[in-house]
Image (cartoon, rainbow, N blue to C red):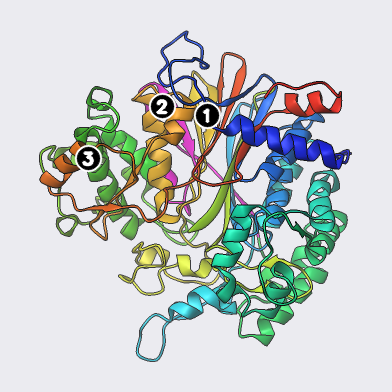
Amino acid sequence: MIRRLAPLSISVLVALAIIAAAPSPADARESAGEPIIRYDAIHHPVVDALGMVATQNALATAVGARILAEGGNAVDAAVAVGFALAVVLPRAGNLGGGGFMMVHMAGEERTIAIDYREMAPAAAGRDIFLDADGSVDKDASRYSHRASGVPGTVAGLHHALARYGTMPWAAVIAPAVELAREGFVVSHDMNWSLERSRQRLILNPATAHAYYKPDGTTWQPGEHFRQPDLAASLELIAGEGPEAFYQGEIAQKIAREMEANGGLITIEDLAGYRVVERAPVTGEYRGYRIALMPPPSSGGVHIVQMLNVLEEFPVAQMGYGSADALHLLAEVMRRAYADRSKHLGDPDFYDVPVDWLTGDAYAKRLAAQIDMTEATPSTEIRPGTVPAPESPDTTHYSVMDAEGNVVANTYTLNFSYGSGVTIPGTGILMNNEMDDFSAKPGVPNAFGLLGGEANAVGAGKRPLSSMTPALLFRDGVPVLATGTPGGSRIITTVLQQLVNIIDHGMGIADATHAPRIHHQWMPDVLGIEPGFSPDTLALLRARGHELAEARWSMGSLQSVLYRDGYFYGVSDPRRPDAASMGPTLVRCLDTGQICPH
């Protein structure tokens, strides 16, 4: 059973995690045999010999690190983190959403893709979000009770623990129950996020009650925030298992709220939800093997597709941040996203041409189209034709344990705080994942992504997603778990992490912190984070790229790297409150020692 941390211990634990995650001198470029920690560069990771947890919230990281310290495996820690994030990161952590989990079990030497994506209710028809004149009703698909698909998070986390974990269900939920019941101190980031969404969220009385003060104002930094309704829901789930959510008291409350407000989800939909294990999408890139989430994630297919194209070019010789390297990335990205618009959907309803999209022949064809001196206008690019007959808010976390088990998990409500609808009496925010379907071919969703028949709304279907939890292997050994939130930018963020590490030889911290770009075919604009040379940007414009400085930073990579007996955790500085931590720090504090950080 998980021991309760004393208040002083948890505060020290979190403070040290944040300090350890901050940039400081270390390795920028490493070659074989060199140590990862060096003092001739800018950034370094958190290091531990017993395992590592990297998440977007330090409180949740501490929960996962304690599970590892108490003898749990990576899956035990990942499930505990998933429930903890539902409490401490309500804009993305969730019980009312869904996601994808990549699991590698060292003892079995196999890698599993767990699909717990939301499913469209039985009442969801093809034209459910079209109004009388055939236009898409965006408010209905994003902010109404109809916006929610059947949640998969509780079922998915239970499936992972039952099959691959070692600890009791109630034990891994206990830390989340305590955080919800006893509360935690509001951070500046949580205050900012709630204030930014306040006008939308307080329109729903249950959301206003659960997440704002009685007078409708926002909880301030330093104030103590408790969630008694959510604590009661978590206790029900801990005691009764997922049946509480899908058939019992919580299910009844969800169904009543939906029926009373024009929602689609019924008690039968909840009872019929199923988790699916799928074979990962895999690829080879310059001596590494990559395992990624298959459809209905689009990320796995298109990262392998893009890496295949990049392998036709001398990326390392181009150098990170050069005009050639950025031009090539943009050209590869726009072609992959064009294919995404036509060929990707729920494989249980649509025959996704995975083998063709990830094949070498198609990669060579795409590579031959790229002119290194001039940008290809996106209007001249069309999705490939299969040969006959052939968030912004989500959150990711990564965990590795000392036995070699690995988890990369990405889950979401879609928008920050999902639809904004909280089920009364539960504290549970609902997703708005129905907007991830193509409500009408050719009409972009909230992230500007186009889709077609493959991703049309349909009863029982899972909407296409960009979530891309990823595992990287060298000589059969898992060496990296990574992933990120970021809506349409998830795929390109993960791609650049892999290229930075493999092609540009960066250490994990530098690869994470380096500026990023993004192109998604339509609109025909190359998004640029601050930090690239003005000379490079001028060269890109001269090649015909329309550049746009990113309005938001791109992603929040939460990564764990393994090398030479040590685990290296890096939590992206682009999101406040993120932290990495290993079990050694927890054990050190428990024994009353003065701990390294």
Element marked by disc 2: helix
> Residue at 82% of width from left, 60% of height from top?
231
Residue 110 in view in this figure: yes
Residue at numbered disc 1: 480
Element marked by disc 1: strand
CA distance for labels 1 and 3: 32 Å
> Residue at 48% of width from left, 45% of height from top?
468
**Closer to viewer: mark 2 or mark 1:** 2
- Marks 2 & 1, CB-CB < 8 Å contact: yes
Q: Name the amino acid type tagged 2.
A: Ile
Residue 165 in view in this figure: no
Looking at the image, residue 437 lies above or below residue 66 = below
Please provide percent x and percent y for residue 493: 41, 43
CA distance for labels 2 and 1: 10 Å
Please provide percent x and percent y for residue 549: 30, 52
**Closer to viewer: mark 1 or mark 3:** 3
Q: Name the amino acid type tagged 3.
A: Pro
- Region in magenta: 274-301
Please provide percent x and percent y for residue 484: 50, 45
